Amino acid sequence: MWLLKVFSVIYFTACAAQDPYDEPPVPSLQLQSEWSDVFPSEKVELSCSVTGSSDWTFTWYRNTQQLQEPDPNVSLSPEGSKLTITAATQTHSGSYSCEAHHKTKSVTTKSSNSVKLTVYANKPKPTLTRSSNFDKMFPGEPVTFTCKVDVASGWVYLWYHKGTDEIPAHNNNTYTIASIDHPNSGQYHCKAKRGKDPFYTEESDTTVLQVSDPPKPSLELLSSWPDVFENETVEFRCEVHSTDWTFTWYRNQKELKEELMEDMYLEEDDSLLNVTVVTQAYEGGYACKAHLKSRGVSSGFSNTVNVILYENVPKPTMNKVPGFNPMYVGETVNLNCNVDVSSGWKYQWYKDGIELRPINETNSIHLALSDQGRYWCKATRGEIISTDFSEEIQQDVLEIPIPSLNLITSWFHVFPTESVKLSCGMDGSLNWIYTWYKHRQVVQADNVVSFDSNGATLSIRSASAKHVGQYNCKGHLNDRSVGSNFSSGLTLNVYGEKPRVTLMQDPTHNVMHTEDSVSFSCHVNVSSGWEYLWLKDGSLLTETGNNHTIKSVARTNTGSYQCKAKRGRDTVFSSDQSQAVRLDVEERPQANIILLTGWSEVFSTDSLVLRCGVHESQNMWNYTWFKDGQPIDLQPSEKHAVTPQNDPEQSLYTCKGIRTGRPSYSRSSDSLKTKNLLLKRRVLLSISGCIFFGIIAVFLGCIILRVIRKPADGEEKPEEAELFLTMAQLKGRDDAPCPLVEYITDAELNASSKEADDNGTICSETPLPITSQEDQVVTSENQDGTEKNGGLISFK
């Protein structure tokens, strides 16, 4: 067709040259751009020319319609010989032609040949394909990507890996990787371009190339244990999580394909390896590999399973948790039977020789009293392996004891500020921790209430009304689920006021006499555990106890008596003082013995008559007599006669007054000893006679001397001295010639008698000392005789 156009142009040119009046030439329309099918925004250039002349202007037509309206995307050269579409759109599609007009002549040519322009609605999008459609590919495999644009032509292809990374020097529509590796993993896409001012297609869809190592086979031991005993069976399985894989087996890194033994065989496409009878030759580390033969891919080694062969069947060990013994009813003990080699064991339990039902490694027992006994176990595996019996374990089971609640302080009826201590304990049990309750609510420690380290003692430092209530305790073992029941209860009472103290006297006489016995008792109206303090006239006495007895009162016991009570050690609580009780003590009247035998009877009798009397007493008395401290068995009498018949030993006599009123008896008299009493009386009477007649002789001598001696005449007469002194004057003088003897001892009486015999005198100028109570009796008789009849009766 193009040749036809060329010949036509040559023909018309020749004709025009020959004859200016021939037909005008036909313009020639040519596509200056590379293709007539374009895409939006591509550039299109058309040219219209008349051969051999430049005196023409041109008019353009699209689909026989002249292009008249202005179009911003369409431009013409000055004479109109070139039509340029700078950015094509679908409105520019159509058949284009042109006409030529001579500039100087009114000549218009026929329409040129037409050029059809096709403008697509959208940019094209390449299609990306991959030679292998496997989701996963493995290192070393080849892959080819193909990118294709189905419309137009003139395309140059661009390849991209991982987003915007352009793959250089690959402008073909195919991209081949001969041996992939992990860096080739990722997303791939492509696009195409054409023209000098490149027009680009849309990007293709992405395709992902996932490069992974071949799957690692998983070697699984199908038998229950890898460490075995002779004649047991071992079975392995090698698998990957996909199909079409085959396997090879290795022992100690050597392939078993040619090394399979008599008791070893493969099953299920070589995925199962079975050793029916294990011997020492089968011990070692087993592994496998997987192969994908259709793609020439092989995996690495699987995990390794070591087969260990034991020569001897072990003996199980046995222990229990917890390790306490004994344990208590309700606790749980776990008996563990363990074989420390291999696995897959089943256990048999025995108690006191009887097989138990559990076959687990642990025998858990919720203890009752019937569970006490001896336990042992053994283990079995399969049908041929059985161990020896383990050692025995003794398990003792006790009933949980009930705690005993005791009062450490001596009372549970207390007063404010007193201290209280309670103890909680279990007989014969250790390691218990105790919890305290009041009205079944847990007692908490505070600044008043405290516990010792294990709670066995509850101490209330200062009791108050809030501590009133019934207390119980419970015991539990630390770190063990053992708890006792509640103990018996103790009720603590706290009084609101101090106790009342009462002092009582027995007997209740206001006035006591010496030697009387009196007892005071102190009583507290409430509670117990009291210690008593005694006070006399406000001063503390040494006596303790609630009774204060004075067995024989004396005048020093006179005073006001009180008592008070206290108790407690850490915190002492004291009561108020009792009322005062006044004790008055008077001296008990004294009995005395008087000798009634007169002087006139000294030579006529050898008996003595004694009389008992009570000094300074106006009461009526009866009298009891005593000889050598023993009562004389006679009717009470004021008098008592002593004769050689009833007293051959000359004993010691006392007497005591008795009566029905108070005082009921007197003090005993001083003792009177009758031995040699009659002789003493005679000696005393002789001495008295000598003294009497000696005084008369002196008196008469003085008178005679006065009469005979006459003074000289004229001599100054001195003052006459008194020659006769009265008895009172004689007593007051130290130079009396012979004083009255008041006390004479037995030795002096004897001495006086002897001197009288030797010297013929019975008077001595040296006074006699007081030596005995018998001499005092003589003096008493003398005084009594003077009062009665003016004579000397006795000397004391």
Image: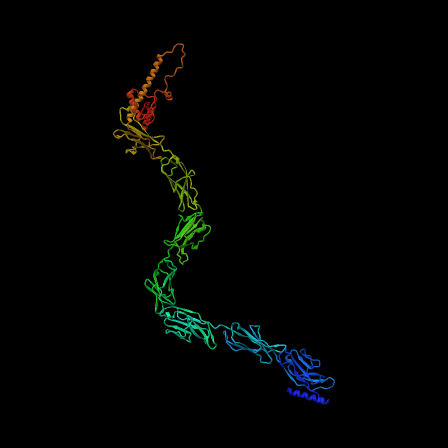
Nearest to the observer: residue 474 or residue 778: 474
Q: Quadrant of residue 475?
A: bottom left
Up-down: is 707 above or below 459?
Answer: above
- Rendered location of residue 70, percent (x, y): 69, 79
* Quarter of the figure that contains the N terminus: bottom right
Q: How is the image coloured?
A: rainbow
- Rendered location of residue 102, percent (x, y): 72, 85
Q: Quadrant of residue 730?
A: top left
Which residue sits furthest right? 104
Which residue sits furthest left? 645
**Drawn side of residue 62 relative to residue 734, left or right:** right
- Rendered location of residue 663, percent (x, y): 35, 34
Q: Quadrant of residue 382?
A: bottom left
Q: How many marks?
A: 0
**Drawn side of residue 114 relative to residue 762, left or right:** right
Nearest to the observer: residue 58 or residue 509: 58
Nearest to the observer: residue 626 or residue 149: 149
* Quarter of the figure that contains the C terminus: top left
**Drawn side of residue 668 relative to residue 148, left or right:** left
- Rendered location of residue 601, percent (x, y): 28, 24
Up-down: is 114 above or below 540?
Answer: below
Please report the residue visible at 28 percent of the width from the left and 26 percent of the height from the top: 678
